[in-house]
Every structure is written in structure tokens, then in C-alpha cells.
Amino acid sequence: MANMINLTINNIPVSVEEGSTILEAARKLSIRIPTLCNHDDLCVAGNCRVCVVEQIGNRTLQAACATPVRENMQILTNSMMVMQARKTIIELLLSEHNADCTKCYKNGNCELQDLSNEYRTGNQIYIDLVPSKHYTIDQSSPSLIKDDSKCIRCQRCVRTCSELQAVSALSAAYKGAGMKISSFYDRPMHEVVCTNCGQCINRCPTGALTERNYIDEVWNAIYDPTKHVVVQTAPAVRVALGEELGYDPGARVTGKLVTALRRLGFDSVLDTDFTADLTIMEEGTELLTRLKKVLVDKDTSAALPMFTSCSPGWIKFIEHTFPELLPHLSTCKSPQQMFGALAKTYYAQKKGINPKDIVSVSIMPCTAKKFEATRPEMRDSGFQDVDYVLTTRELAIMIKQAGIEFMKLDDEDYDRFMGESSGAGVIFGATGGVMEAALRTAYEIVTGREVPFGNLNITPVRGMEGIKEAEVKIENVKPEWSFLEGVTLKVAIAHGLANAKRLMTAIRDGKVQYHFVEIMACPGGCLGGGGQPIPTNLEIRKKRAEAIYAEDENLPIRKSHENPEVLQIYQEFLGEPLSHTSHELLHTHYVPRKRY
Amino acid sequence: METKKLTRVDYIFRPDNTCMDTLKKSLQRDRDEIVLELIDSGLKGRGGAGFLTGLKWKLAKEAPGDIKYVICNADEGEPGTFKDREILDRVPRRVFTGMALCGYVIGAKEGFLYLRAEYKFLAPKLKTIMAEMNEEFKKLGLDFTLNIRYGSGAYVCGEETALIDSMEGRRGEPRNKPPFPVTEGYLNKPTVVNNVETFVNCSIIMAIGAEEYKRFGTDSSRGFKLFSVSGDCSKEGIYELELGMLLSDFVEEFGDGDTKAVQVGGASGFCVPRKKFNQTIIGFEGIPTGGSMKIFNSSRSMYHVLHNYLEFFEEESCGQCTPCRVGCQQLLKGIEAVKSKKRPPSYLDELVKLAKVMKVAAKCGLGQSVGNAFVSIVDNFREEIVY
């Protein structure tokens, strides 16, 4: 039992665990103390000073987010001294900030704007420092825009990039008036180790870090009568989009999502889940092939453990940080890119449309997918396989622009084909989901039986723990898989690149042994992706995860190899997993990159 | 209020060749006894903040942990201060003896001299002496090793937690306190960070005893201290003086006969105008100083003095916290605007309010003390800022 500390806040007694901060104690009393640099996912910074409170008997104010409670503390959160200081601090921030809110992409979703509203900072006392600052806007990245004129130096992005992602593409640079958030040698974002994961965007309180949006480009494609615009939706979008459009976190809005996309004018509304299922067929077969090479053929060129390759943030991370481990990556493209390659080949053929007239749009929980779509390897259809990638947030903006009352929409179903999905495809959106989907299929291929977990739910690979491990013993196999008889398949899952780095280091140093490893760049997997609704925190991510697993449970088909459209495409077009056509369209290669 | 006459003393720069004897004697003593003697001596940190040194050592001694550290803050960066450089040049053994003593008391096996980048020219000599002393510690059976680390030129790294960050190889930014370094300092281990002159005073107290030491200074400001005297003065330089004198006596001794103001404590200190010289005690009961005493005569424009300080702070703020980073810019731009009539004189009142907010809301001592110079100059020389 933890030690309890007694204190008063605004003369109200409260008792909290030792080690709690004043901010946490205040929350317990439902007293809101404004914050900017503080974020539930990150370590304490205490640098914006917006949360200062008065401690009776102390000469200086205390940052509520950074100050631990002590016995008999008397805290005032709204004294005259506090209110004056807080308002001054907000005004100071505004004096350094390009406060042209109506022209800002984050207008209406900005924590600084909210505070300035609350404190009615209309009559600007201080001198506008912006003209003397020569701020730069970095638009070099296909995924994100970094506008220093909106930055309040709270360093949430810096902490996100180092603590959660172990990337450190962003850090504080220079000092005093010149202090700013910058990259290695102030290089443009597309030249540094940035993985485009967008986690910094999710935590930026202002418009300093935003996704590079392609809303106008997509509208133009929709309005162009010569274009056939197909849209695919990633699994994690359907459990988060609602948050932007009036629902609480955890709402499943799949049917309304489809209806809305149709009303926006997309010619065909299809599902990335379909290619998620296809990924399982390809990747599962690839894993079994590698296992055979290693266990039977003693072929040392086949690298185990095999790593998943669906997360483009993860791909760029490993290319920069562990290039020596690239042979371990599955050669499978991500579901988005498989979809893109098929849209302009298989789909085009079936529909009788010239692929040059197809515009392929994807709705993703992800900003790294924007970068991925522009990779030179991703043109196997003869065209850029995916033309535009929109985040969940951008789609919400389009829905609002179109005047669609989202909550009142009826549910509709995806178009066919490439619109059918299994539950296994859906759970790609959560950390551990690819692993679970792969096990459901691989185990059944090898043994002819379902995975030995209740109702197909492989719970050890689920949940928000940073690194997860699981084992599945393979027994009574089919004759053609006899080399796997009695083998205990060992798997690991990591989400968030800091966890990925820990796991990769252990693997590289030979400290752990696995057969198959799933990595997702973002905390919680795609459901916590850099393109998802803001704000994010563990609570919200858990709600989205619950929704994903509920979606899975409610689908009639829950195994990728039972998706009828997947079976059909192998019959009509691909032949079999890892076939020549598969290799041409669905697989890729990677490039080692330097860290500096 | 008790005051002392301006009295020169000579303890700090006495030849330091007997230091090892002092250390040897002290190592026979009980650690708690040493702490008590230091507390009894009333010695307060000589960097400027004035925390009771004996108490700091006591807290570090009592902090749980097998590994502890001693750090000597030689990042002497306060404008107008140049006494630590002289100490390190002339009596480094007295500094290192104080560090070793601290190591013995708190149970630290390593001590670091954090030397400001501009003093690197001292390093070869200091390293030689450190090596000699490390050998002598061994002979005395003291498990303590001296080492050197360098600053990179940031003023803020004189703040102890920023200094520690810098030593750990990170960007030097002040940390949130608590925890204080005495419980979580260098590499998150209990750490004593003291100023160069503080360690020297510890050595002296061990040599002469607290009783003798207490004869100097006042109740609130025990002992003597080095003053770096500069500006419009008759004899600039470094002087060792008893604490507790009146500023009027100081000006009498060092001024050029036309002194208008004295900046006590450097850029982060206070500006005292002529009319307050005879009410101002130099010490913790009046205006404390890390040593910097800048004298201005009537030919000086206090606007330029203030402008100069603000330019310094605008550049030397680490930039992490809002009140300091933006506040410094606003104060600087603000007085420029008033001077050039772009803002009315009443804007100075807004700036004073801002300076007072910085004083209570900034994260570290740097940001909290910018207001000192600002408010004291604007209060006393308002017409020079406006016209």
C-alpha cells in the first residue's frame, strides 16, 4: 500500500499517493489546471509554465505538472498571483507565435488557441516578435509539414521522437531567443532520420507539426470526369474516425464510413482489409518457406526471425538504424501498397478501365504511408500504385466540407471485389494483430486445425505492453509439414519504435530467439497511428483496440485464408502465394540508409 | 542591523602547500562532526544563491546510495566575476582539498571540476596538480579521485542541474526541482555541487576551526569572500573582504569619487543607486553577491547598462521555459520601444509586471533573477530609460 499524502488545493483537502504531482492531485478533485507541455504519454518537462500554481509559504510559483505533492501542502490554483502569471505566460507565447489562426490548418484544434480563448488575450500587450524571427516552414517531407512560426517550444515532439520512438529526428537547438526545435544540422525533414510516423503531429499542441494534406488533390480527382477514383480504407480508420465527427473514442463506424465515402463521390469504395488478408497469405507462406529453408535445407541465407513489413514508419526506421537486419524483413509490401498495385492491374482489368485513368486513394491512420506511396519501388503496376494518401483526420475534414451529417448516415457495405474482409484483416489495426492473423492461418495450414485458443482469440499477443512474447507448439501436422512436428513457434511483438529498438538490439546481439516478430511503429499499432484523431493517450488507444477486437468477433469470416475474394484472386490472377505475379506486384525490397 | 567595517582579510590566497595536512587531520575526524562544524560556521554557498553548505553536505551524506559525486562548479560566467579563475590559478590545492573533504564526508569516490570553456588554458596545470593529489589521497587511504570536465560556453550551465545535464553529455537545461542534486544529481546519484570558493572556505574552516571563522562577518553572512571589482573604480581587481559591510564603505574605498550606482551580483544581481549606498549591506541580509561588483559613474547611461544585461540574457537563456525565453526578449524589445517612443513610458510598468512574473514563474534561478537588474534599474533610473 503506497504512502498517502494529505494536502489542500484551493482549501479542499485531498489525499493522494506519494510521488503524485500537484496536477494529478488536482485532477482527483476535478480541478482543471491548464497545461501545454504536459502530455500523458510523455515524461514531465515543466517548461511551458502554464500550469504554475501558488504554494502558500513559497516565494516562487510551482509547475503543477512537475512538482510532487508533500504533506500539508496548501496549493492555490487560481490566486491572483497565479492568474496574473498564467495570463502573462499565455500572452508571451502568443507574442512569439504566428497567431494567424484563420489561416492555420489546426484552426479549431489547437491547445494554445483554446487557452487564449479562455483567458481572452485579445488586447495584445506585448510586442509581436514574429516579424523579427525569420521562421521557416519545412515542406520537404511528403508526410508532414513543420512550421516553426507556430511552435511554442513545449518539446512534446522532441520527447515523443526520443522517448516513444527512439528516433530523435527532432531536438532542441540553439539557445535563448534563437532556441528552436530542429533536426540534425537543421537539415530538411526528408533528409534526416525521420520515419514519418507522425507521432509528433499527434502530440503537437499547435499547428507547428501537421500532416501534409492532399485534400484538394483528392477533390480534384473526384471532380475529374475522366478519372475513376478508387478508395481503400485501413482497418484502424473505422474505429477512430468517429472521434472527429461526434462520437466517443471506441465507436465503430465502418458502415457510415463507407456511406460517407460514397457520398463524397468516390467511384468505388474498397477495403484495405482485403489486402491485409492477402498479406497474411503471402507473409504466412513466406514464413513457412523460410522455416523450411532453415530447418530442412539448412540454408543460412534465409534469415530468421522474420520481421513483418506492414508499417512504413518501421521500415524507414530499420533502414536507418538496423540496416544489417534488413534481410529479416518480410518482402511483402504493406496492405496499402498491395492494394495499390492490384487496383491498377487486377481491378483495372476486371473493370475494363485503363489503369492510367484510375486514381487510387487510401484512407490511412498513418502519415508514413504518404511517404511510402512515393517510394520509387512502389510503381509495380507501371504507375504510382497509390496516388494519394489521406489520414483519418483529412477524411474527417472532407466529410465536414461536404456537409455530410455523419452521425445520421445509414450503414452501407463495401463494393465488391477487393472489399471483402475477414476479422483477421481487421485486427491488423491493433498491435499484435498481424501476428494473431498470421497464426490463425499458418497454424491451420500446417495442422489442418484451428489455433488452440478459445474462439480464435490469441490473447497473449494482445494488449498494450511494449514488448510481448508468445509460443505456440505445433503438433500433429499434415504430412507435407512434417518438419514442423513438435516445433514450438516463438514470436514477439513490439509497438512504438523505442520498444522496437530494444527488441532489435536484443535480437541483433543474440540475446533472444524468435521465429517471427511483428513490429508496428506507433504506440498501440495503427490504431495509435500518426494520422489518427487528436488527442491521443493510452485510454483512447485502449478504447480503439476494444473496438477493433469487437469488429473482428462480429465478422462471419475471421481467418484470412477463408476470405472468398482472396481465394478468388489467387484463382483468377495470382495463382498461388509467392507466385511469379505475386512477387512482381505484392513484394518489394528495402534500402539501407545512413543515420546522418 | 549588524554591520561590519570594510576589512581586508587574507585567508584564501595564502600558500596552499599545507592543505594536505589539513586534509590528513580531517580524515581522522568523524564525518558528522565535520558536518556539524560546517553548519556551525554558518558558511553559505559562494556562488550567489547562499544555501548553507554544511546542510547541503548533510543532505547528500544522508541520501541513500552507494555511489555519490562531488562537483566543483567552475563555470564562472556571471558578468563581472573573475575570482574563481584567480583561485584556480593560485591556490588550486585549497579547492581540491575541499572537494576531497566533501568526498570523505558524503561518501563520494569521484569528484569533478566543471571548468568553463574559456578557462581551458588552466587545464594542463590543474590536471598535473589533480594527478599529484590523487596520488596523495591514495597515500592517505582516501578513496577519492579528481577529474575534470569542460563546459561549452553556455551561461546557464552554471546552474547546477544544467551543469549536470551538460556533464552527462546532454544539452544543458535546468531540471525540475525537486528532486535536488543532493538526492538525484549526476547520473541520478546523490551529488554535491559547490562553487570553487565554497570548497576553498571549507578547507579554511577545517584548518582554522569554525570558532575562528565565525569571528568574521555577521549573523546572516559568516566569513569573508572574494569580490571582483570592476567598472569606474580607482583600483579594480580581486579583493578578499569580510562580509557585512555597507555599500557606502565599499564605494568609498573602490569608487572613483563620482559613483552613481553599483551593480551588486552581476547581471542577475541588483543595481543600487547612490541614495541607497548607506542603507545597503553586502551580504545575505542585504544584497548577496557571487562576487561581482560593477561600479558606474555619472558618465554612464543606465539605459545602456540595462540594454547590455538584457542582450546578455536574451542570448543566454536556455530557451526551454516560456517566462525566461520570451520574457527576456520582451524586456529588451520593450525598453527599445520606450526609448524610441514607439511605446509610451507607461509601458515600463507593464514590463515591470512582466519581470515580476518571471521572478516567480521561471523554471530556474536564471529566469527568476533577470527581473532583479531590470526592476532595480527601472525603479531607480526610470528617466534614463525613457529619455
Image (cartoon, helix red, strand yellow):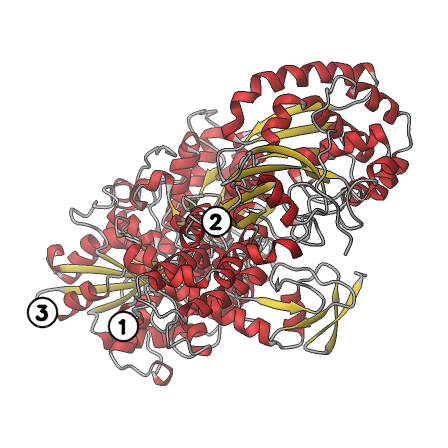
Residues at marks 1 and 2, CA–CA distance in whole angstroms:
44 Å
Q: Which residue is mark 3?
A: A225
State the CA–CA distance, disc 3 to disc 2.
58 Å
Pointer 2: what residue? B317
Between A46 and B57, the one lying in front of the other is B57
In this view, the residue in front, A472 or A363, is A363
Query: Compared with residue A252, is residue B110 higher up or lower down, i.e. above or below?
Result: above
Give the residue type that dot 2 points to. Answer: Ser
Q: Nearer the viewer, residue B67 or A326?
A: B67
Q: In this rendering, do the residues under marks 1 and 2 share a single chain?
A: no
For the residue carrying disc 1, how many other residues have a C-alpha within 10 Å: few (<14), some (14-19), or many (20+)? some
- Horizontal and vertical percent position of residue B177: 65, 53
Direction from residue B386 to residue A30 in the image, left or right? right
The quadrant holding residue B7 is top right
| Above or below A118: residue A274 | above
> Whole-percent x and y of residue A189?
32, 46
Q: Secondary structure at mark 1?
A: helix
Residue A512 occupies quadrant: top right
